[in-house]
Image: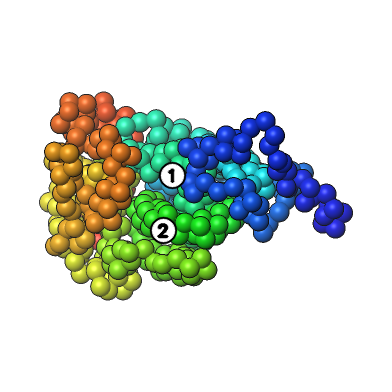
Amino acid sequence: MATAREPWLELARKTDWTFSYVSEREVFPPEIAGEPWLPHTEWVGWDEPFRTTYAEYVTQQAAKNTAVEAVRQALGRIADMGDLDPAWVNGMKLHSALLPLAEFAATVGNLRATRFARDSAWRHTANFGALDECRHTQIPLGLMHGLVPWDPQFDWTHRFYHTTNWVSIAARHVFDELLLTADPIEFAVATNFVFETGFTNLQFVGLSALAHRVKDRMVQTMLQSIQTDEARHAQIGPAVLGIVARHDPERAQRWLDKWFWRSWHLFAIATGFTMDYLTPVHLRTRSFKEFMEEWVIDQYIESLAQFGLQKPWYWDTFLESLDYYHHMVYASAYSYRATVWFDMVVPSPDDRAWLHRKYPASWSAMEPVWARISERWRETDPGVDFGVHATAIPAFCDLCQIVLCGGTPSANTAMTEVIEGRHHVFCSEPCRRIYLAEPQRYGAHKNIVKRVLAGEAPGNLIEFLTRYSSLDEETWGRDVCHGDYPWLDRGGKRC
């Protein structure tokens, strides 16, 4: 089969031609096709390692969809979900809301490359990528829809990006720039190289392995089915980056530095919460930091070296944040759990002992936070969630739109900058520099605090939850155990 297709496959891949009525720059205007603008002679060597035909693509995808549907029919019933650990189920809610409609936005980015990418083989591969992303949208939407009657929080798989929930604001801020506004060249470097080559392994490999351990076969099959596509169209990134790095290494470095940091903040929440807090402690294999070191850091540094590029200028800051950042955000999110659509847990003494072993440099600083929260639950009747809940509006970063959780519990890295007479706040130096490099790109966006001050969002917590964040008593986040933990010596009947 492979031999029979070879004589014509190259002709089908490379379908560029010489323009006679218009110039190449008019067909691929730099404002849309992207910079650096180079003649096609510089792109003609673009090559993807894993070549496929449309017939092969359809056959493979049909088989994968059949496998997912078979698992859904066998294991996707509500009764099957009831057998899973409740904390893990809430990790599913987090993952399922953050990614499906973002994958649909990636369809748009790939379609832009299908038209404006600078080599025909790249355009064909991007077309397959667009089809992939449609599939990655449909699978979780279909799987989670059947769980809505059991738990209405699963409705946020579809609702999430249609709300002004603070997490959806932060996620849209990064995904809109990454997937909808980036030109095909930046899209390929940011999405296909930084985002998909490294960070998505945390979800589709790391979480898949954990799903297997917790016996969640439905999620395991879903993640593995999506990963096979990610591995194929992630090949676009290195091929594009190699050409950009050769002609404009400064631009390539700037893009890589920006998108690694922005991707890191997103996945610290999307994956870090589930790996270190929402997976039963006796089933965890490695910490989120260990997954990052294995699946992202080593691979990323090796990839940069291939193109003669450097580690990001903030590398030491990033390495320190591996020990702190997702722990800080999780503690903040737990304190304001009614503002999200999934339930959260207080780490037990066993959890905290495990976290101390995995994070010896930082967990002693986090321990007092959870000791205080545990003590508050001892003083509060089980089920009274707002008795152990923050009420004041926290500050948000003007770049990443996430609560100011940089640094450590004793030394937050938040900073301010006056830009055109207005004060802006940032969670870290990398977020500040990214903003200042392109203020016209970010300046019009308002974080939650600025929306409240402008009268666009209510300052009252209940109104903020219901009228602005699209939550209600059925869907806003609570403590998974309602504060009735066995290790609090108060019965532990609910968990």
Residue 155: which quarter of the image?
top left
Q: Is residue 371 visible?
A: no
Q: How is the image coloured?
A: rainbow
Amino acid type for the residue under numbered disc 1: Leu
Q: Label 2: few (<14), some or many (≥20) within 10 Å?
A: few
Q: Return the residue at label 1.
A: 178
**Residue at (28% x, 56% y) in the render:** 430
**Residue at (14% x, 62% y) in the render:** 410
**Residue at (43% x, 47% y) in the render:** 95
| Along the line of sight, the residue nearer the viewer: 111 or 11 | 11
Amino acid type for the residue under numbered disc 2: Glu
Query: For numbered disc 2, what is the local secondary structure?
Result: helix
> Looking at the rendered structure, which numbered label has been put on residue 253?
none
> Looking at the rendered structure, which numbered label has been put on residue 250?
2
Disc 2 versus disc 1: distance between alpha carbons?
19 Å
> Reading the chain from its start, which is encountered first: label 2 or label 1?
1
**Residue at (40% x, 34% y) in the render:** 161
